[in-house]
Amino acid sequence: MIDFNYETDFELSNEAKYAEWISEVIASEGKKEGEISYIFCDDEYLLEINQQHLDHDTLTDIISFDYTIGNEISGDIFISIERVKDNAVDFNVPFAEELLRVMAHGVLHYCGYKDKGDDHEKLMRSKEEEKIAMFHVKQ
């Protein structure tokens, strides 16, 4: 089950479409869907989580807590809408595309993909692009 929660004014326009897409992303990696919660928030909210749980005093676009057991993907994915907006400007991409990238990124971590080191980062970026393309395919 894919669940969406909001700790900011932002809301997805079509939750069902996003949930269906995330389900497809999980299936495309040969995994089973468990309980995945997306929590959309602001920088301050995510910074507090970063400080309390990870001992990092930096802003970030996403923090994910992985509760995956075996092949069943589960977890909480916190996304700062402020960071996503800023990153979209920095990377010169539409906000909607950057949001998809970050949403896919969290699930891809649960599927076993890493992003530390050049080779891992290249594979993660490639997988993100592949999953973003899936969103735009008529479902």
Image (spheres, grey):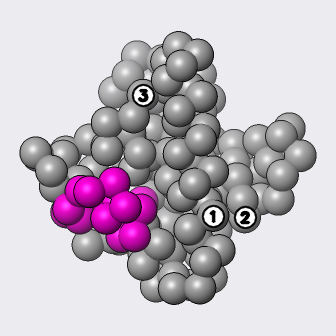
Mark 3: few, some, or many residues within 10 Å (few <14, many ≥20)?
A: some
Q: Which residue is mark 2?
A: 96
Q: Which element type, helix, strand or loop, lies under badge 2?
A: helix
Q: Is residue 94 left or right of residue 48?
A: right
What amino acid is found at the position of numbered circle 3 in the picture?
Lys
Q: Which residue is mark 1?
A: 133
Residue 59 in sight in this render: yes
Q: Is residue 19 left or right of residue 11?
A: left
Q: Which residue is mark 3?
A: 114
Give how far across and how far down residue 22 sits, in percent. 42, 66
Give 31 or 47, whichever is nearer the viewer: 31
Give how far across and how far down residue 113 sits, in percent. 39, 34
Which residue is at 37% across, 61% downward? 28
C-alpha gap between disc 3 and disc 2: 23 Å
* Magenta-span inclusion, residue 31: yes
The earlier-in-sequence mark between 3 and 2 is 2
Which residue is at 26% across, 57% downward? 30
Q: Which element type, helix, strand or loop, lies under badge 1?
A: helix
Badge nearest the viewer, 3 or 1: 1
Which residue is at 80% across, 48% downward? 88
Give how far across and how far down residue 23 sits, in percent. 36, 70
Where, quadrant-wise, is the N terminus in this rendering? Answer: bottom left
Circles 1 and 2 in contact, beta carbons < 8 Å: no
What amino acid is found at the position of numbered circle 2 in the picture?
Ala
The earlier-in-sequence mark between 3 and 1 is 3
Image: magenta residue range? 23-38
